[in-house]
Image: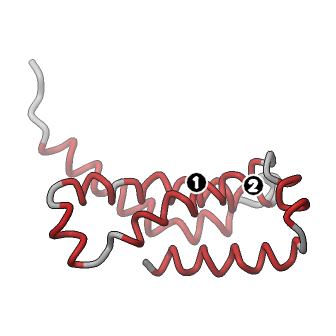
Amino acid sequence: MASFGYALLHTLFYLLDAGSAAKVLAQLPRLDIWSGWVSLLTMAPLALTSSDGWVRRLGPRWKSLQRWAYAAALLGFLHAVSLNDWDDPWEPLIVSAPLIALQIWRMRRYVIRRPANT
């Protein structure tokens, strides 16, 4: 929910800076712009269904829906890196490092627990 709030605030400042819908639409084909929009749109249903009531209503489907957070994070990373034309990826990498480390740890645990198909 916090990530969505930050992204929404970031988008608001972007829209204010752009000044017109025509300028926003003209920039839409750029990778750094469309990846941000798709990330925001991906996070919207996640934020809306993050309450306890929605967890109960959706049951096991809630977890499947919440897995879209990985796609939103990847798109957000792509958005941040492509904003600088890939020249300086260090800031997005440093900010994303905890998420990357946790995901590697999760994947490692899954691979270790998975039985070998022999």
The spot of residue 17 in percent (x, y) is 86, 77
- How many numbered discs sit on the rendered protein? 2
The spot of residue 27 in percent (x, y) is 85, 54
The spot of residue 16 in percent (x, y) is 82, 79
- Depth check, front residue: 48 or 94: 48
Q: Residues within 10 Å of mark 1 (few under 14, many from 20)?
A: many
How far apart, in angstroms, are the residues tagged by discs 1 and 2?
9 Å
Q: Quadrant of the C terminus?
A: top left
Q: Quadrant of residue 95?
A: bottom right
Q: Amino acid at mark 2?
A: Asp
Is residue 47 toward the left or the right of residue 97 in the image? Answer: left
Secondary structure under the numbered disc 1 in the rendered image: helix
Q: Residue at x 43, y 77 (%)?
A: 1
The circle on residue 109 is none
According to the picture, the residue beneath numbered tag 2 turns out to be 32
The circle on residue 75 is 1
* 16, above or below 65, in the image: below
Q: Residue at x 20, y 61 (%)?
A: 58
Q: Earlier in the sequence, mark 1 or mark 2?
A: 2
* 56, above or below 83, in the image: below
Query: Hey, which residue is sitting farthest top in the picture?
Result: 118
Q: Amino acid at mark 1?
A: Leu
Q: Residue at x 53, y 54 (%)?
A: 74
Q: Residue at x 50, y 66 (%)?
A: 97
Q: Residues within 10 Å of mark 2 (few under 14, many from 20)?
A: many
The spot of residue 38 in percent (x, y) is 60, 54
Contact, mark 1 vs mark 2 (Cβ under 8 Å): no
Secondary structure under the numbered disc 2 in the rendered image: helix
